Image (cartoon, rainbow, N blue to C red):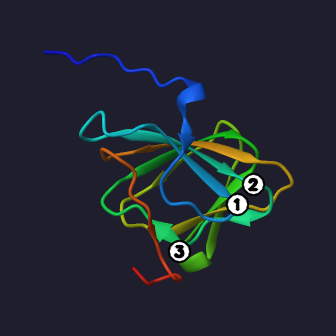
């Protein structure tokens, strides 16, 4: 039998989950389906997340506003996301989100799990 459509209104999205200085994570749709969840990530100007991975969850990023960077491969690879760009971060891939600019970055995050997994690391290669 089909499920019920769920809508999360923008006014109902609140800060949640593990936070890093300058990075705001907000759960939008979590614990409603077995294999998908969605959240919002806002990166303040001149900020960066901790090096982390998302465990067994694959992650898709959609860049809405600002110019952000996904850093991976031990800090050696930097890939810029402009508004309208997508990125795939495979499960267990160590990475970091960075905002080197003067305006906020807004990304929509979709993960392949019921709720977001964020495993912050002390440094690259420390998972």
| Residue where numbered disc 3 is placed | 73
Q: Residue 100: x and y, percent?
A: 79, 62
> Which residue, as the protein is rendered here, is positioned at the far left?
1
The relative height of residue 9 versus residue 118 in the rendered view (above or below) is above
First in residue order: circle 3 vs circle 2? 2
First in residue order: circle 1 vs circle 2? 1
Image depth: mark 3 or mark 1 in front: 1
| Callout 1: SS | loop
Give me the residue at 37% from left, 66% from top: 92
Q: Residue 108: x and y, percent?
A: 56, 40
Q: Residue 93: x and y, percent?
A: 43, 67
| Residue where numbered disc 1 is placed | 22
Answer yes or no: do the residues labelled 1 and 2 have beta carbons within 8 Å? yes
Determine crowd level at label 1: few under 14, some 14-19, many 20+ residues with C-alpha closer than 10 A.
some
Give me the residue at 47% from left, 54% from top: 17
| Callout 2: SS | loop
Residue 127 occupies which quadrant of the picture? bottom left
Tell me the number on the disc at residue 44. Answer: 2
Determine crowd level at label 3: few under 14, some 14-19, many 20+ residues with C-alpha closer than 10 A.
few
In three-dimensional space, the C-alpha distance between marks 3 and 1, rounded to whole angstroms, equals 23 Å
Give me the residue at 54% from left, 34% from top: 13
Give me the residue at 34% from left, 16% from top: 5
The relative height of residue 83 versus residue 6 in the rendered view (above or below) is below
């Amino acid at each position: 039998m089909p499920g019920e459509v769920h809508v999360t209104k923008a006014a109902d999205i609140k800060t949640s989950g593990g936070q890093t200085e300058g990075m705001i994570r907000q759960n939008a749709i979590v614990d409603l389906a077995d294999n998908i969840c969605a959240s919002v990530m806002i990166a303040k100007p001149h900020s960066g997340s901790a090096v982390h991975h998302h465990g067994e969850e694959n992650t898709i990023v959609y860049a809405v506003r600002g110019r952000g960077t996904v850093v991976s491969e031990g800090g050696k690879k930097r890939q810029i996301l402009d508004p309208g760009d997508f990125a795939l971060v495979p499960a267990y891939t160590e990475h970091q989100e960075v905002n080197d600019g003067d305006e906020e970055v807004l990304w929509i995050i979709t993960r392949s799990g019921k709720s977001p997994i964020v495993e912050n690391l002390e440094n690259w290669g420390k998972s």
